[in-house]
Image: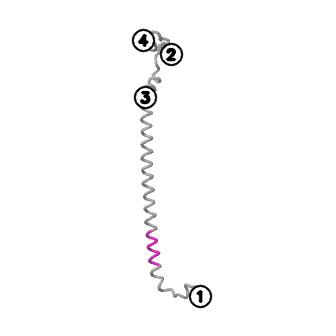
Amino acid sequence: MSRTTTPLRPLRSVIQRQPSSISTIARPHQQVQSQMRHYSAKAPTPTGEFYKTFTRPVAKCLLVAVFTYQLVYWGWTKLEHDEVVADRKAEISRLENQVRALQASSTPAKPSASVDGKR
């Protein structure tokens, strides 16, 4: 071996030297568990058990219901808007055709002098 390299130590000796970092992580978890044990000595109320059991499924169901309602409402509104636009375009084309027909029927009957406004 050269002077610059250090020999490698076994992994077990490294892990045994640094238990402080592992123990600080484990301590808060142990404290929480001891507190939970202390509070779990009480009998749960039926109301608390009901909410504990059904809060998440009910919330999920309501969220899906609201999403579905919004999706159907948006679709319905979009279809209504498309129908109104189609009705308006049909009305405009009908009125344009009516104007063209009236202009075609009334154009030859007018004298050219009255169009200029001079006699």
Mark nearer the viewer, 2 or 4: 4
Badge 4 is on which residue? 7
Instruction: Residue at 43% x, 9% y: name it.
Output: 13
Badge 3 is on which residue? 54
On the rendered image, what quadrant is the C terminus found in? bottom right
As shown in the figure, which amino acid type bears the numbered disc 4?
Answer: Pro
Q: Which mark is residue 28?
A: 2
Instruction: Confirm whether residue 34 shows in the render.
Output: no
**Image height check: is 40 above or below 96?**
above
Mark nearer the viewer, 3 or 1: 1
Name the N-terminal-most of marks 4 and 1.
Answer: 4
- Estimate the x, y position of residue 5 in percent, counting from the top left: 44, 14
Q: CA distance from mark 4 to mark 3?
A: 60 Å
Estimate how packed mark 4 is, as few (under 14), some (14 to 19) or many (20 or more) residues with alpha carbons within 10 Å. few
- SS type, badge 1: loop
As shown in the figure, which amino acid type bears the numbered disc 3?
Answer: Phe
* CB atoms of marks 4 and 3 within 8 Å: no
Magenta range is 93-102
- Estimate the x, y position of residue 104 in percent, counting from the top left: 45, 80
Instruction: Residue at 42% x, 38% y: name it.
Output: 64
What is the magenta segment's predominant secondary structure? helix
Determine the image quadrant of residue 11. Answer: top left
- SS type, badge 3: helix
**Image height check: is 107 above or below 92?**
below
- SS type, badge 2: helix
Nearer the observer, 41 or 110: 110
As shown in the figure, which amino acid type bears the numbered disc 1?
Answer: Lys
